[in-house]
Image (tube, rainbow, N blue to C red):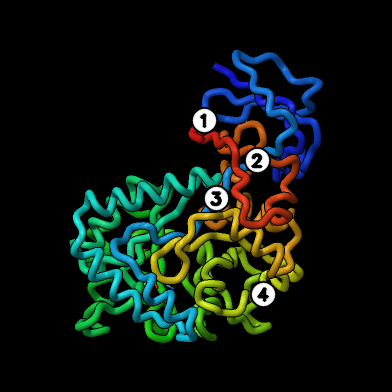
Amino acid sequence: MSLLLTNIGELTTNDAELGRRKDAALVIERGRIAWVGDAASAPAADIATDLQGAAVLPGWVDTHSHIVFAGDRSDEFEARMAGERYAAGGIALTVAATRRASEAELRATAAALRAEAERGGTTFLETKTGYGLDVESEVRSAKVARSVADTVTFLGAHVVPPGSDAREYLDLVRGPMLQAVRPYVDAIDVFCEEGAFTVDQSREVLEAGRRAGLELRGHGNQLGHSGGVLLAVELGALSVDHCNHLTSADVAALAASDTVATFLPACDLSTREPFGPARAILDAGGTIALATNCNPGTSFTTSMQFCVATAVLQMRLTIEEAVFAATAAAARAVARDDVGVIRPGARADLQSLRAPGVSHLAYRPGVPLTDAVWKDGERVV
Ligand code: NIG
């Protein structure tokens, strides 16, 4: 069964040859894009949908979220808005609630957030463990994550849980915990920050993950110059995320590497950290991505559209750069080349907007513009 989407007012493909085009059409067949071109020369298909001039673009690729959790931290948020600074210690509250929750409860919360993200145009989602922090709870979290996300990251090294010895906990993470979660995860991550893990400890964690055949990701330079960014670049991580506090050496290292610098603007607003220098990395030739960092502590949103709008309005990205960062560049951060683009052969993961062009994503901030969403060629919204 083939589906023709026609009368697309503006089609953003992220493909160098196909570009951003007016009056376009595309054909979906067996879950993949089969054809892209001018509406006037579209081939026939089994079903045709007239999009009446709407904009179409790839579905969002959200490469940083922590949606497997229980509990609420709105009190902590309120205290922050009254002047307190975010510190890694708040994670312990979510850990306690997550350990108490059943697998079914965790799955229900995570599935609801995934559905909310999908309604906002997200068609590919990464999520992490990291609120269990003992072997049993991390395995439970990894199983839930596997059932709701497209790719799963092991974040046993989120913080040292209260009451544990740092050395013993690190050995647990690198050894039995890693082994136990391994069947459910694709990558390993570490929170390299004051109050969490040092550079040397983070290196131990990432190297153990690499030996287990996992891709590497990092939380780096969120609250200060933690050294996490340079470590991620040195180890060839797919992505290093947060990047709020970067020196010119960090920017140069990122720009010269294949490690994607992932910015999390909703988190920066909620923690009142300065936005990271995404503009400088782009100007130096590096690759940047945008992600929500959906979690109950620092960034309780699933809205990629909000992140795109903020990156344009506050971080001085152009519309095109921000959309690319939230789709095709983000796909690089999860080692995928079949999502985040609209070209023949790519997965048919796309969205149409209640708007004639992608500029409206920032021109109309706060207005949910995603209209229809297709994932693997199926209409899901
Ligand atoms: O990416 N920075 C580390 N982890 C999360 C926050 C987790 C929390 O505070 O619950 C983040 O911001």
Q: Earlier in the sequence, mark 1 or mark 3?
A: 3
Give the amino acid at mark 2: Leu
Residue 202 position within the rendered picture, expressed as x and y whole percent measured from the top left: 40, 77
Callout in the foreground (4, 2): 2
Residue 33 position within the rendered picture, expressed as x and y whole percent measured from the top left: 61, 30
Q: Earlier in the sequence, mark 2 or mark 3?
A: 3
Q: Earlier in the sequence, mark 4 or mark 2?
A: 4
Q: Earlier in the sequence, mark 1 or mark 4?
A: 4
Residue 351 or residue 128, whichever sits in front = 351
Q: Residue at x 60, y 26 (%)?
A: 28
Q: Residue at x 30, y 69 (%)?
A: 94
Residue 38 or residue 168, whichever sits in front = 38
Give the amino acid at mark 4: Pro
- Cα–Cα span, label 4 and label 3: 21 Å
Callout in the foreground (2, 1): 2
Query: Does the CB distance between marks 2 and 1 fall below 8 Å?
Result: no
Q: Decide: few, some or many residues near mark 1? Use Cα within 10 Å; few <14, some 14-19, many ≥20.
A: few
Callout in the foreground (2, 3): 2
- The residue carrying mark 2 is 353
The residue tagged with tag 2: helix, strand or loop? strand
Residue 237 or residue 294, whichever sits in front = 294
The residue tagged with tag 1: helix, strand or loop? strand
- The residue carrying mark 1 is 379
Give the amino acid at mark 1: Arg
Report if the beta carbon of the residue with label 4 is closer than 8 angstroms to ligand 1: no
Residue 231 position within the rendered picture, expressed as x and y whole percent measured from the top left: 50, 77
Lateral position of residue 151 relative to residue 328, left or right: left
Give the answer, above or below, for where 158 lies relative to 139: below
Residue 238 position within the rendered picture, expressed as x and y whole percent measured from the top left: 52, 62
- Cα–Cα span, label 2 and label 3: 16 Å
The residue tagged with tag 4: helix, strand or loop? loop
